[in-house]
Amino acid sequence: MPISFLNPTLLLGAMAAALPVIIHFLSRRRVQHQKFSDLRFLDEVQSRQARSLGLRRWLLLLLRVLAILCVALAAAGPRWGGLGDGSGARSVLFVVDNSASMSTGQQEGTRLDEAVRVCEDMIRILPGDTSVQVMMAGSRTRAVFGDWLPAGAGAIGGLSLVQQTDGAFDQARVFAEAARLVARAPGSPVQIVVLSDLQDGPVLDSWETGARRLLDAGETNLLVRRIGEQTVGGGVLAVDLPGRAVRPGENINLQAQVVPQFDEQVFALELDGRPVAEVVTSGQVGQPVDVSFALTVPGVGRHLGTVRKDTDAMPADDTRPFVLEVPRQLDVLVVHGQDQPRDGVVGRGGWRYLVEALNPGGDGSLFHTQVLGSAELTTGAITAADVVFFVDPDPLGRRALQGLLEWVRGGGQAVVLAGDPKLNQYLTDTLLPAAGLPTEVGFAAVAAPGQHARVVDAEHPVFQGLDAAAVTTFEEVAWRRWFRLKEGAGKVLVSLTGDDPLLIEAPLEAGRFVILTSDLQPTSSDLAGSPMALPFFQRLTAWLAGSGGTAAANTEVGREAVFRPRGLQAQAVLERAEGLLVLDALGNPAGAADLVWLQGEPRLRGGGIDRAGYVTFLAGNDTLGVVAAVLPTAESELALRSAVQYGELLGDLGLDMAGDLTGTDPAEFMAALGGHGLSSWLLALALLLLMVELGVGRGARA
């Protein structure tokens, strides 16, 4: 370990050690030679005594020089070890983990309470010239103080700003924010003290980028203190909504993933504050278990639900909220190419079959359809729809295509049914590149009876819950004309016997395209006349509408709360834009909602979410919508890393852990920062040397 000095300029005092040497040589006696009678025997005795006295004088000189050196070194404030630069200037950055796992209870408060107490004790013992900064690392990673503060009462009082959150400890963001603060630190090297439970979890690629930023920011020393011990508990990891629009009175199974704390533990489902179902687990304790709640869909509207269990040491993950939207109707836009005489009464690509499947009989359906020709399409018509179908469309105008792409990227859902061979060039040059699919397009046609389909993913929401007979009926449909596409980045849901994709799901940022490589003309397939046409297109549309709408009502803590008003809600937003408010997950006013426009549609932004629960958007006293903020799944992991394991992880990222402070008291923390003082030992050594010098000196005079 290195030796440093608090007052290195006082080392100049070591030059005083030269004084005894100078005095020694200046005070040497000159030998005078005089003739005398023969005294040979006396000369021999005197010679032996002179040699003895000479050795003692040199020893006395050495002892005096060493004593002066010890005093000079002691005055310079030497320290053995420590992480400072020896100048006395020091900057210490405390990283306080306030993620959800830090809410775990202990004998005295929570893990976060202990972390704050430890941080307070460490700041209290730091010298007044030490600069201090505190960083919270939870749902948001940010500095507590506006700038670096001197250690003392002000910094300690500022710790009251550290509050519990239900977000995750994001190591990449910790590195990035620490790099920013290190670059502004008044002293170097910066001591970074991590106070965390070191919860176990996956190591992400973004960690390496953050670690490099920290290395480039300046010289640092990383010290770690793990807070808390392993605990036993359980929780609710996830609630999987149907993934499609549902109807009132429909029987569904709501899936959840839970971790039971003990065998045969009860998990309950509540909807609008009332218990509606419960399950008893029968699986491995402490491991994730999938459970299913049987539920009858309530009436039209917004329903607040939770899956919960009895509270344990970590209450944050014992209740998981969700929002179930039951729409009155879904707006579906059907866009088709210009009808030709050869299309017959079913229209271009058989678009009338599609309209009838979505709205049989014209009344009482979940889907409200609007039909437009390709030439009549406008951006406003696209953005007003939940789902847009394109059935053998004519080439779209530049503005309409651009509006479509922006709408899909923002979360819109579009379906393309293409079976007309004349669309080959348009698909190759325009529509497929826009959907992010490969542009190699071929056309296939076979003689009757044609090929049959194969459902690739029977668990997909479009097919999930269908019995074997229904799936078989769908797969028995004959296909005689289709485009040969490559899936590219898309996902094949249905393929033909020869492995040509028939139904492809292609995500595009927040939205998606779905490509059906044929149309509904009888010359293309028998789907229009199949009993599976109605459930297939209704399920497909309900899934897309649910993915683009209700899924947005459930998000993780740490992200921004965003609400998409539709219909009358959007009208209320425009009429009362000055009275838009947000209530946070704890029901407290969180300020005004920000109104922004995306692809011609209003969006309400409520800022970052710190706690799990329901974030409510208001227009005056009227509720516009609710977003359920849920705990990040990783925060329910109960395993903790040891400081040694965390140090190994840092080493893999190119960072070195300078010290493990787990279980230490503040005095040991100060020793880790400043090292062990050597001044008292040097003064004691100087005193000992002087005592030896006195003893040797008496002997020389005797």
Image (cartoon, helix red, strand yellow):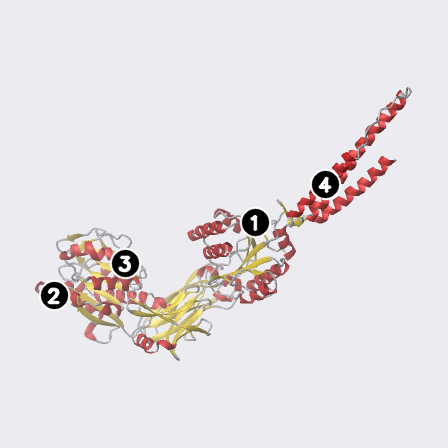
Q: Amino acid at mark 2?
A: Asp
How far apart in space, not on screen, are marks 2 and 4 (Cα)?
Answer: 108 Å
Report helix, strand or loop for mark 4. helix
Provide the residue designation for mark 2: 339
Mark sitting earlier along the chain (1/4): 4
Q: Amino acid at mark 4?
A: Ala
Provide the residue designation for mark 4: 17
Q: Residue 197: image x %, image y %? A: 54, 58
- Residue found at the far right of this picture: 37
Provide the residue designation for mark 3: 505
Mark sitting earlier along the chain (1/3): 3
Q: Amino acid at mark 3?
A: Glu
Report helix, strand or loop for mark 3. strand
Q: Using a 10 Å C-alpha cutoff, classify the residue at mark 2 as few (fewer than 14 neighbours), some (14 to 19) or many (20 or more).
A: some
Q: Residue 310: image x %, image y %? A: 50, 68
Is 622 drawn above or below residue 629 in the view shown?
below
Q: Residue 695: image x %, image y %? A: 83, 39
Q: Residue 283: image x %, image y %? A: 46, 60
Mark sitting earlier along the chain (2/4): 4
Foreground label between 3 and 2 = 2
